[in-house]
Structures are given as structure tokens and as C-alpha cells.
Amino acid sequence: MPNISAELVNKSILLVNKNNSGYIGTYIVTMRGPVWKKWRNIFNPGFSAGNLTNLVPSVVKKTGIFISILEKHSEKQDIIKMKNLLDNLTMDIIGQVVMLGERFRFSASIQSNSQRYKKASSLAIFRGRAKSFHQISPTSTIYTLVLWPKVDKHISGELQKHIEAHNQSDSPTNKSVVGLALKAYESESSQVSQTKSPERKTDMDPFFKKICIAQIKLFLFSGHDTTSSSICYTLYLLSKHPNLLRRVQEELDQVFSADRRQISERITQKPALLKEIPYTTAVIRESLRLFPTVSSTCDGERDFFVTDSHGRRFPTENFLVWVNPHAVHHTPELWENPDEFQPERWSEDKRKQIPKGAWRAFEHGARNYIGQVLAMLESKILVCMVARDFVVRDVYEELEQPGSVKRVVGERAYQVQLSQPAGDLPCRIERI
Ligand code: HEM
């Protein structure tokens, strides 16, 4: 169970009856115990800060394509859905990081593939988490039969290219998450069998291949939707707080340059500069506090009880415990003015006062989220390259009848479905 006090837990969880007790799926997010540990260790290296720093230039390049799309929309002044646009970018980036290098170009070209991957990967995870999902969703069954084989075939073909590249030690593909996982898997297998793995391979170990295909679907899903929703909210909140946007711009001018074109060059040349933008980082963390984009579940246990504020204890065994970071992040006992956007709470001296476990956008402990360095890296690069020149103006009011704008707790861009902004954040792009 993540590090969380009982008082917090009772404010933050939903208990869901678990009808598939003990299920260990093919995805690391559904695995447990030593099986989870083994596979998490194998897939960890590709997500390390060191490895991801090498990928900064290609993330900047892809973000550059996104910026040119924004430029066109700012000229046309048409209404766009920011979430959809960002989904393509983040899918592009995660595809590149995980395995496919430059071939994975959703934002520019293979739109239909993007949609196919998005649907297939998200359904894969739902089914992985709850076996019964397909029983309540006929669409899921159709996708399983029609979409998955296509996606699996595509991924399988790409994996074959990895095996070929694996034989050439200088291939850039070897630095992808899959390339490094393949290396870790081979090293682990050769330790177990105490035999040296053969020098050249022409095919992937079928078992590794099966696990790998599942993980790639998991990474594509977890790695695009969460990040794009969180970036949507950062851009949205900055548009609502022009004074804070100005502070971000001042910081960017100071650390990089007042010229946006130079920002991308400077990041490419010196990725370490991304560690020198505390205010921009605070803005991203604060957006994730107000609008956390993931809530997670874990198994209840015989000795784990939830205690409410009256001291009543509730058993959790045979239940799925659903931790709700949104509730924790909006708890007045933990956060002063919890519903206000205040990046200052993350300043060096103030952040020390934040209680442990109060900010859990990426969860805590060993089961925290594998791609957090990547998500922060992507978010920082994007905010640096967008916020200097553009404002994302939402057009909710324009699209709805006057006076009939729906709000949840006073917020129009409330979170729907998998925590994305309502209506996928319809907006116009304004050039500063
Ligand atoms: C802002 C973006 C993101 C947020 C807020 C986020 C949040 C989370 C959280 C809270 C968990 C824990 C879930 C649980 O306990 O069940 C998690 C797990 C996970 N996330 Fe993310 N995530 C983000 C982006 C990404 C990215 C870019 C990837 C890239 C692959 C990723 C891959 C995963 C995986 C594989 C797990 C399962 C880890 C395990 O069970 O060992 N996420 N994420």
C-alpha cells in the first residue's frame, strides 16, 4: 500500500468489489510480487534519466513539428481540440522512446495508425486490469478481434527490426526502451542458465516477444494520454493566469533566450538547462495537483483497514482499493486554498511544508510510475517551446448557449473519462 495516512485514505478511496482476485496479467501494471519486480527491472533502464537525456533532441524536433501546426492554427484562428493535437505528439514521442525511432510519426502522417494504437492500447489496459471489462463492453470485444491482431502484427514487425539492429552494437535502436530491455533480458537469462547467449540472433525469444508486445501497448497507452492531458491543463491554467504566464516567460528568457527559435536550439545543445527552470517546473507540478491525470488501484489486504474520521474501521481484504489523488490534492487539511492555482507552493522553502504523500500525481514507493522522468521532460520541453509565444484560449463559452455553460465545482474544463479536460479542450491559438 502506498505511504498514506488512514485519515487521508478515508477521504480518498473508493472500494470496488474485486471479482478477479489474484489476477496477474501480462502488463507490468497488473503483475504482482516477484514477477512484477523482474519485469519492471528489465524495462526500467530505458526510462532512466541518463537514457532519456540522449533522446532530448528528438523530443525537441517532434515538438517543433507540433509548434508549426500551432502556428498555422494561430494564423487561421480556427477552433481546435488541444487534447487531440497533443495526443498525436505524445503518442509520437512515446513511440520513439519505446521502440520505433523516427518511423513513429503520428503528428505528421499516420493518423489512422495513431487512432488504431490509441484505441487498442487503452482497451488492452482496461482488460488487463479487469478481466470482466469485455463482458460489459461489446466494443472492447470487437476491438480485441479486429484491432489487436493488426496492432500486434505491426509491433511484431518492428520488434524484428530491433533484433536485426541488436546485432549491430552502434544502432540507435539499442537505446530505445525495447532495445535496453532486450539487453537486460538476455543478460538475466544467461545468468540463470549460466550459458553465454549466442552472438547473433535472427529471431526474438518468443516469450520475451509476447511480454514485450504487451508492454509496448501499455507504454503507448500510459505514455500518451496522461501526459497530453496534463500538458493541456498546464497550458489552460497559464491562459487563465496571465501574470503567472509572464513569470514563466521571464524565466525562459533568462535561462534560454528571448527568441523562441533559440529555445529549441539551446535545449538540444544543453538538456541540463531544463533543470534550471524552477518556476516553470512548479507550474507543471501545480497543474498536476489541481488536475491529476491518473488514479490508481491496489489490492486490499487482510491486515489493512481504512479508518474514517469517526474511528470506524473498514476491512479491505477482497476489495480493490482505489486511491483518488484528486481528493487528496483538494483536501484543505493538507493544502492551503486547495482549489487555487498557486505554483509558489513549490518554491524551495514552501515545498518543505508539503506533507509527505500529499502530492501523489505519480504515486509513491516501488509501484510509482515508471515514466515520470519522461513525462516531466516532455512537459517541460513543450511548455518552454509553447508558452514563450502562444496562449491557448479556451472557447467553451463560445460553443455553448449563453448562460448554459456546464461547470463542475466552478470549473468548465472539468475532468472526464480518463481525466482529460471536457470536450478535449476546444480552443483557439493566440500568438503573443
Ligand atoms: C503526466 C503523465 C503521467 C502521470 C500523471 C502518470 C501517473 C502514473 C501513476 C499515478 C501510476 C501508478 C499507477 C498504479 O499505482 O497503479 C503510473 C503507473 C505507470 N505509468 Fe504513468 N503517468 C504518466 C505518464 C506515463 C508515461 C509517459 C509512461 C511511459 C511509459 C507511463 C507508464 C506507466 C507504467 C508502465 C505504469 C505502471 C508501473 C508499474 O506498475 O510498475 N506513465 N503512472
Image (spheres, rainbow, N blue to C red):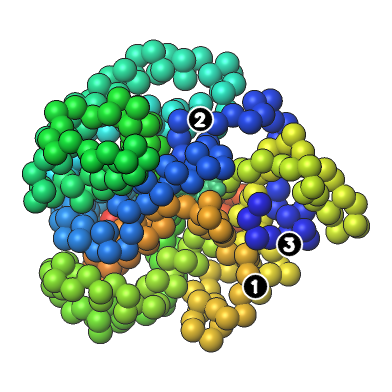
Does 94 sit left or right of 360 as displayed?
A: left
Q: Position of residue 243 (x, y in %)?
A: 41, 77
Quarter of the image with the C terminus is: bottom left
Labelled disc at residue 247: none
Residue depicted at 56% across the width and 42% down the height: 33
Does 60 sit left or right of 46 as displayed?
A: left
Q: Position of residue 57 (x, y in %)?
A: 16, 60
Labelled disc at residue 25: 2
Q: Is residue 107 above or below residue 4?
A: above
Camera-side residue of 5 and 294: 5
Label 1 crowding class (10 Å Cα cut-off): few <14, some 14-19, many 20+?
A: few
Q: Using the rendered view, name the quadrant where residue 168 is placed.
A: top left
What amino acid type is highlighted by mark number 2? Gly
To which residue does mark 1 refer?
355
Label 2 crowding class (10 Å Cα cut-off): few <14, some 14-19, many 20+?
A: some
Name the secondary structure under disc 3.
loop
Q: Position of residue 125 (x, y in %)?
A: 47, 32
Residue depicted at 51% across the width and 30% down the height: 25
- Contact? badges 2 and 3 (CB < 8 Å): no
To which residue does mark 3 refer?
5
Name the secondary structure under disc 1.
loop
State the separation of the CA atoms marked 1 and 3.
11 Å
Q: Position of residue 196 (x, y in %)?
A: 23, 41
Label 3 crowding class (10 Å Cα cut-off): few <14, some 14-19, many 20+?
A: few
Let me know if residue 178 appears in the view.
Answer: no
Q: Is mark 1 within 8 Å of ligand 1?
A: no
Q: Is residue 259 above or below residue 216?
A: below
Residue depicted at 73% across the width and 69% down the height: 333
State the separation of the CA atoms marked 2 and 3.
29 Å
Which mark's residue is nearer the viewer, 2 or 3? Answer: 2
